[in-house]
Amino acid sequence: MANIARDAIRVGLEVGTKRTFAWADDWPGWCRAGRDEAAALAALEAAASRYAQVAAGAGLALPWHHAMSFEVVERVPGDATTDFGAPAQVAGIDRVPTSAAQAERIVAILEAAWSALDAIVAAAPAELRRGPRGGGRDRDKVFAHVVAAENAYARVIGLKHREPDPKDRAAVAAQRQAISALLREPSDGSPIGGRRWPPKTAARRITWHVLDHAWEIEDRAETPAAP
């Protein structure tokens, strides 16, 4: 990408045949999809102000401004999961070491995303607006899906944690605390527990999933404007 500003945000691209994901390397969970590279980058930029609120919850200031620019630092090929609608690949930029301070920052963003999800769930009605074809889960089922997915992610990084009842907030908090504790450890960039995901991949994937569904609930809780 030519004429990159000095404060350009480093991004990676996961390129499938039907869908591309763009993610900000230094900002776990700031990850959006589009039908191609340009659309994914446009979606990433469109989500900047929304993600900035999550960053602020972690005590961080997103360098977001009207003339935002991105620097694509890596492209990785996607697969069927990418095209289905979820980022799935480990990138080379995920395999770098993370210091204790960097790990703490990653966890702060993840925990801010969880707090954002909880606040959105608390404010949303139980029944959400349906999609154009009448589809879509209601609030509690979306939240239950996030909790169940996090249990699966925990296993990917070597945690054997009983899947909590989504209505048991103490159990949900315990699962989150276990994930945070593991991601808080400094790393040489190797997969956690010798498995599949390095810490940066795990943080990106988990935080993206939390925010993707938090924003889904928020959007579908709104009453569409009258024509």
Image (spheres, rainbow, N blue to C red):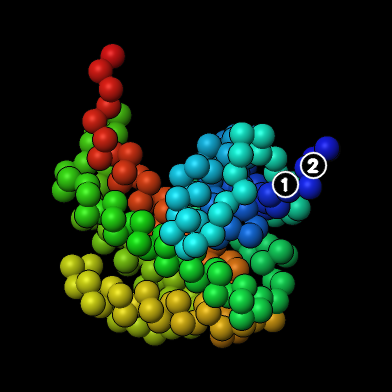
Mark identifier at residue 4: 2
- For label 1, the residue is 8
Return the x and y of residue 9 as percentages of the image width and height.
68, 49
Residue occupying the point 22% across, 49% down: 123
| Residue 197 can be seen in this image | no
- Residue 151 against residue 90 in the figure, above or below: below
Q: Nearer the viewer, residue 170 or 148?
A: 170
Label 2, residues with CA under 10 Å away: few <14, some 14-19, many ≥20: few
The amino acid type of the residue labelled 1 equals Ala
| Residue 154 left/right relative to 71 | left
Return the x and y of residue 147 as percentages of the image width and height.
32, 66
Q: Nearer the viewer, residue 65 or 200?
A: 65
Measure how far apart labels 1 and 2 are at the Cα level. Answer: 6 Å
Residue occupying the point 31% across, 80% down: 174
| Residue 169 left/right relative to 154 | left
Label 1, residues with CA under 10 Å away: few <14, some 14-19, many ≥20: some
